[in-house]
Image (cartoon, rainbow, N blue to C red):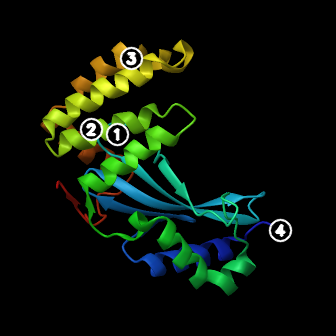
Amino acid sequence: MKKMTATEKKAITQDWKEAIGAYEIYKPLHLLKRNGPLLTGIYLQPVYGEEHYVPVFHTHSLMTPFPVVSLATPSPLLNGKGVDESISPLRHSTKFDELVERFGLQCPTAFLNTLTCSTLDTLYQDAVASAHNFPIQAMTDNVLLLAWCKKEARVAERIAYYKLILQGWPEGVTQHVGGATGWERDIKKLLEPQRLVESVTQELKKFKLSHFPDHSLTCD
């Protein structure tokens, strides 16, 4: 086996772009789409020394500064054994339609053009409930999504709920955000609507994505 070549990566990326439609090519093996204050993406994550790849749907909030486009709420394509489905260039070329169909069944959100607040809210809550790596970023992104859509009561409820979760984690995990109390204090500073709008504008400019079409977020 050998690493995927640059030509293979380009072709694989283009195939996924054409299959799903709404996404733009961000980098080789990485597609992105803007939905209002966040990005959704398909990362064709290299595995096995870049011999294979795994399709991973993810989100990235633009409402708070972050140094890179993050892979928040990752949803990889799984095989029949429930583990990540690694795909070789040969398998890609012979089974692509089948792989796209399976990914659509497993992760229908990846195939939507416009997204809704309720869809993303569920996605974030599921990520928090199922993650084993202390998903502070998903908690923050969830609260900011609700703030963007002016769901004031749910913002307060979610902050209180996530604060309780944070209080149950080891101190070393939450130390960088000042513990549960520090997280609560900092996130409340981020909720001002104009600050959220400014952050989205600045983050799009930073990542050179201002030209991306906005496929919109519906605040249902």
Pointer 1 with pointer 2, Cβ within 8 A: yes
Crowding at mark 4 (Cα within 10 Å: few <14, some 14-19, many 20+): few
Q: Is residue 55 left or right of residue 52?
A: left
How far apart are the two marked residues, 1 and 3, measured between alpha carbons?
16 Å
Q: Is residue 152 left or right of residue 47?
A: left
| For marks 1 and 3 on the same chain, the one whose residue lies earlier in the sequence | 1
Q: Which mark is residue 2?
A: 4
Q: Is residue 203 left or right of residue 49?
A: left
Q: Which mark is residue 144?
A: 2
> Residue 122: percent from the left, percent from the top?
35, 49
In the depicted structure, whether residue 80 falls above or below residue 65: below
Identified at 24% across, 52% down, the residue is: 117
Write down the residue under mark 1: 141
| For marks 2 and 4 on the same chain, the one whose residue lies earlier in the sequence | 4
Pointer 2 with pointer 4, Cβ within 8 A: no
Identified at 19% across, 38% down, the residue is: 147
| For marks 4 and 3 on the same chain, the one whose residue lies earlier in the sequence | 4
For the residues carrying marks 2 and 4, which lies nearer the camera in this image?
A: 2
How far apart are the two marked residues, 3 and 2, measured between alpha carbons?
17 Å
Write down the residue under mark 3: 180
Identify the amino acid type marked 1: Asp
Identify the amino acid type marked 4: Lys
How far apart are the two marked residues, 1 and 2, measured between alpha carbons?
5 Å
Identify the secondary structure beneath mark 4.
loop
In the depicted structure, whether residue 88 falls above or below residue 207: below
> Residue 49: percent from the left, percent from the top?
78, 57
Identify the secondary structure beneath mark 1.
helix
How far apart are the two marked residues, 2 and 4, measured between alpha carbons?
43 Å
In the depicted structure, whether residue 31 falls above or below residue 130: below
For the residues carrying marks 3 and 2, which lies nearer the camera in this image?
A: 3
For the residues carrying marks 1 and 3, which lies nearer the camera in this image?
A: 3
